[in-house]
Amino acid sequence: MSDEPKSKNITWHHGDVTQADREKCHGHKAAVLWYTGLSGSGKSTLAQAVQTALFERDCETYVLDGDNVRHGLNNNLGFSPEDRTENIRRIGEVAKLFADAGIITSTAFISPYRADRDEARKISGDMFCEIWVDADLAICEERDTKGLYKKARAGEIPEFTGISAPYEEPKNAELVVNTGKDNLEECVKQVLAMLTEKGILS
Ligand SMILES: Nc1ncnc2c1ncn2[C@@H]1O[C@H](COP(=O)(O)OP(=O)(O)OP(=O)(O)O)[C@@H](O)[C@H]1O
Ligand SMILES: [Mg+2]
């Protein structure tokens, strides 16, 4: 899909309240925390736990989660490569809008294609932090929190990441957390440490 809008008769209207104004008011910088990894690797669990930790520090924060977004905004999209790309493009744009509102925005989508994640990175620029939630397929399959691996192995789910569709591992993630090795509390600490190191939290 082209980056150019379909209509030629639209003009960007600049707001009087800037992102910097909002960040000052919130007491922290805005960011897009892009969690990526296999199903069951722990993206949602970790994104929610980090959100709670940030909320307790009075930060403005929100999680855009895969299945929830597929119930609404993206309910016309499936799991073909084209639909996955459009899914991620829309999330990338929504995450940018949330971050523009000064919010530490997390997204928890498998987002298996490197090119799609790179597009999302382009959309949010410097605010983008890719967090690879790394866990071996065997661990994710053993967890099988949604029972999806069992169905995928039985051939009931086509194009299932890790089984019948690829997961392209990140090459330049800002952070890699290993949920097979470190517990949730430890992983949350690693994300918060990255946010402090990047000056998003002071
Ligand atoms: N360190 C950890 N961080 C996050 N989750 C962990 C960790 N250790 C174990 N888990 C467990 O792993 C499971 C991860 O499930 P979760 O739904 O968060 O995965 P997901 O990546 O969001 O999957 P999906 O792509 O299907 O939504 C949970 O049962 C969680 O308790
Ligand atoms: Mg999830």
Image: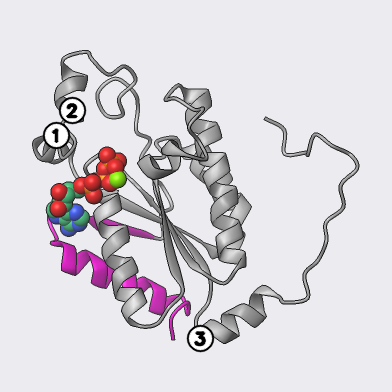
Q: Residue at x 84, y 37 (%)?
A: 7
Q: Quadrant of the N terminus?
A: top right
Quickly name the residue at label 2: 149
Is residue 127 at least partly visible in the picture? yes
Kind of residue indicated by mark 1: Glu
Residue at the farthest front position = 72
Q: CA distance from mark 2 to mark 1?
A: 6 Å
**For residue 141, which numbered disc appears in the image?**
1
Against 75, residue 175 (above or below) is below
Q: Quadrant of residue 165?
A: top left
Q: Which residues are magenta?
A: 175-202
3 or 1: tag closer to the N-terminus: 3
Is residue 180 at least partly visible in the picture? no
Kind of residue indicated by mark 2: Tyr
Q: Residue at x 80, y 34 (%)?
A: 6
Q: Secondary structure at mark 2?
A: helix
Quickly name the residue at label 3: 27
The one nearer the camera, 91 or 116, is 91
Q: Residue at x 59, y 85 (%)?
A: 24
